[in-house]
Image (spheres, rainbow, N blue to C red):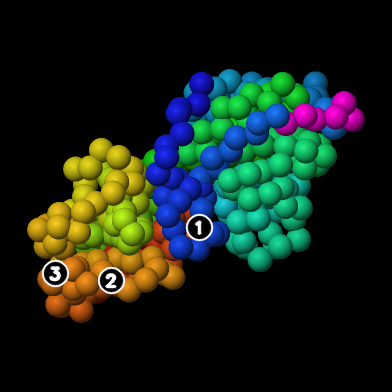
Amino acid sequence: MLRKPSKKRGGDGRPKVFSRPRLLAILVVTLPGLLLSSASCSAAREPGPESRTVVDELGRSVKVSTSPSRIVSLAPSVTETLFALGLGDRIAGVTSYCDYPPETASKEKVGDTQRPSIEKIVALKPDLVIIVTASQLEQFVTRLDELGIPVYVSNPSTVEGVLGSVERLGELTGTGERASELSSSLRARIEAVRARVGDGPRPRVLLILGNEPLITVGGTNFINDLIDRAGGRSISADEKNDYPHYSLESAVAKQPEVIFLQSGEPDLPERLKQTPAARGGRVYRLDSDLLLRPGPRIVDGLEQMASKIHP
């Protein structure tokens, strides 16, 4: 069973307090009273005779085609990974928040990441639907299972987990060699960052995901892992929730030396202007899409972050 949904998130694993709608990446869906016509139900495609059973990243057994040719992606990070694997021509549908690479503009939209349409998905006759674990769509997944549409759940929670997910999606789609090459190149860039930041000082870092209330990152998600790999030390690393509400008083008391804001977020709260980071001119904005989407471009986000922490 999928885990119980978090009240604090909004899509692809992010808090739903983000100011820009397209950053809402967690799929939190309820489908009350949904009635599909018999014609729609018959449109679902069962895996053909050339199929196999795989285990997804939540440990679920899923029967899929050996080479799925009509894939629906329900997360921007998944869409970016599929394109990076050269699978653009096999993508039948994406969400309205899937905006990278530019080729996604020509893909059929099945709704946003909060309310994807089962009717639209079924009409596309997919042989594979891929979602992220943060979506927590138990009813949604169950309904697609009943319609004979395989659903694979991706579950990256660390930087290494993102690379592992790239490799598993490659195996799933018959592009294992390309996925291996991609993950190897990404690992080489991660190692280059590690070598550059070395064992030097690790400044205290506050990463702000929302201002009202103040939301940051806890110790168990991939964004905190990015901070650590970039040579910083998150002041909220001991928080157990992935995206905890954090008081301004606690943030000021921890005396962060570097503060990161999302692109598009309001300016720094007044109270935080009394921190070493603000006084030292070390408040930076990061490209939110690189930071918040656990796909191949996460390494771009790591490099961007490391260049600010250790210029």
Q: Earlier in the sequence, mark 3 or mark 1?
A: 1
Q: Position of residue 212 (x, y in %)?
A: 33, 59
Task: Say which label, 2 or 3, has the lower sequence index.
Answer: 2
Can residue 280 be seen at all in this image of the molecule?
Answer: yes
2 up-or-down from 131: above or below: above
User: Does dot 1 land on a helix, a strand or a loop?
Assistant: helix
Residue annotated with mark 1: 23
- Check disc 1: other Cα within 10 Å, few if <14, some if 14-19, many if 20+: many
Please tell me whether mark 2 or mark 1 is closer to you in this view: 2
Using the image, tell me which numbered label, if any, was put on residue 268. Answer: 2
Q: Residues within 10 Å of mark 3 (few under 14, many from 20)?
A: some
Q: Residue at x 66, y 43 (%)?
A: 116
Q: Which residue is mark 3?
A: 275
Start and end of the magenta stretch? 34-39
Query: Callout 3: helix, strand or loop?
Result: loop
Query: Disc 2 to disc 3, how far (Cα)?
Result: 11 Å
User: Which numbered disc flags the more N-terminal residue, 2 or 1?
Assistant: 1
Q: Residue 185: horizontal and vertical position, in percent?
A: 46, 55
Q: Secondary structure at mark 2?
A: loop
Residue 65 in sight: no
Res 286 quadrant in image: bottom left
Which residue does the image show at 58% across and 46% down from the upper left?
Answer: 114
Q: Quadrant of residue 299?
A: bottom left
51 left or right of 151? right
CB atoms of marks 2 and 3 within 8 Å: no
Q: Nearer the viewer, residue 174 or 81?
A: 81
